[in-house]
Image: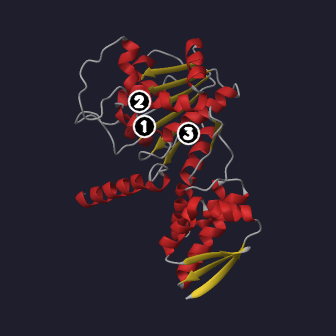
Amino acid sequence: MIEQIINIDRMEQAVALFGTFDENIRLIQNEYMVSIVCRDSELKVTGEPENVMRAVKVIESLLALVNRGEALSDQNVRYCMSLVNEGSEHKIEQLAGDCICITSRGKPVKPKTIGQKKYCTAINKNTVTFGVGPAGTGKTYLAVAMAVTAFRAREINRIILTRPAVEAGEKLGFLPGDLQSKVDPYLRPLYDALFDMLGAETFQKYVERGNIEVAPLAYMRGRTLDDSFIILDEAQNTTPEQMKMFLTRLGMGSKMVITGDITQIDLPGGIRSGLKDAVRILKNIDDIECIFFSASDVVRNRLVQDIIRAYESNGGKKQ
């Protein structure tokens, strides 16, 4: 057993580090089987040497994030621990990134993982960006945030959001209502992200003006999309022909972001995914970049990471 002391400059740092009801510190204690006690301006970490070393690295990394104005949560505490366990604690300083967008409720939107940071950088740098990875990694949400930021800065005139109208493993039959009512259920995740960024009233105003368009992929054929930020969501459910059609809609002064999860393809058997083909065919073209997310980039409930890893492990055993 050894003891190591960490000095804390201000009490506000300790409050942010410990979290509500000391939940952040308890996570670290349970992960590394150490004891952490705060006395005045000192933190005492006691336990086995290797565990103490890792716990201290996590605490110092979290204090660095606090000093940069980051609010700590269950998600980024667990993420810091995973980076320290991998020996990649030097990457943690990259997490304190700039705010991408402010939501309608005044909440800042920031990348929460290294993968998300690379994704946002790639969107800024390239004309076409592919975001491929499991559910919950923020692919669609961050793309919408980047689109809203570009729109507010008047870098583009329109935001166009689209996705293929493919049902997830079950037949819903004929839907009632006009054409918009029929396609709305498929586009709901895109609406949710836009409502969060802009608010319902502002969103509706921009839709009426034509500045925002949310439409199924079939509506893209024959169009040239200039001065637009175009997002194709659930791209794993496109056919190769649909993907080629979509990519060739790119006009002058536009950006494209294509997101999808190749482990959740809902196409009928025997039909290849257009997303898989596009990533393979376009990987060496300048101004096109593909970012691959992993389970560690999941920012939803902690169990989502465990579920994804369990399925990945089961898939590996089957192969």
- Tell me the number on the disc at residue 278: 1
Amino acid under disc 3: Leu
Location of residue 128 (image quadrant): top right
The mark lying in front, picked from 3 and 2, is 3
- The structure residue drawn at horizontal position 41% and vertical position 34%, both measured from the top left corner, is 235
Q: Mark 3 to mark 2: distance in Å?
A: 21 Å
Q: Mark 2 to mark 1: distance in Å?
A: 7 Å
Quadrant location of the C terminus? bottom left
Mark 3 lies on a secondary structure that is helix
User: Which residue is farthest top?
Assistant: 178
- The structure residue drawn at horizontal position 51% and vertical position 66%, both measured from the top left corner, is 27
Location of residue 4 (image quadrant): bottom right
Which badge, 1 or 3, comes first in the chain's sequence?
Answer: 3
Regarding residue 97, the answer to whether it shows in the image is: yes
Kindly identify which residue carries mark 3.
142
- The structure residue drawn at horizontal position 57% and vertical position 55%, both measured from the top left corner, is 73
Kindly identify which residue carries mark 2.
243
Look at the picture and state if 21 lies above or below 266. below
Q: Do the residues labelled 2 and 1 touch (CB within 8 Å)?
A: yes
Amino acid under disc 2: Met
Q: Position of residue 143 (x, y in %)?
A: 55, 36
- Front residue of this view, candidates 283 and 116: 116
Q: Mark 1 to mark 3: distance in Å?
A: 21 Å
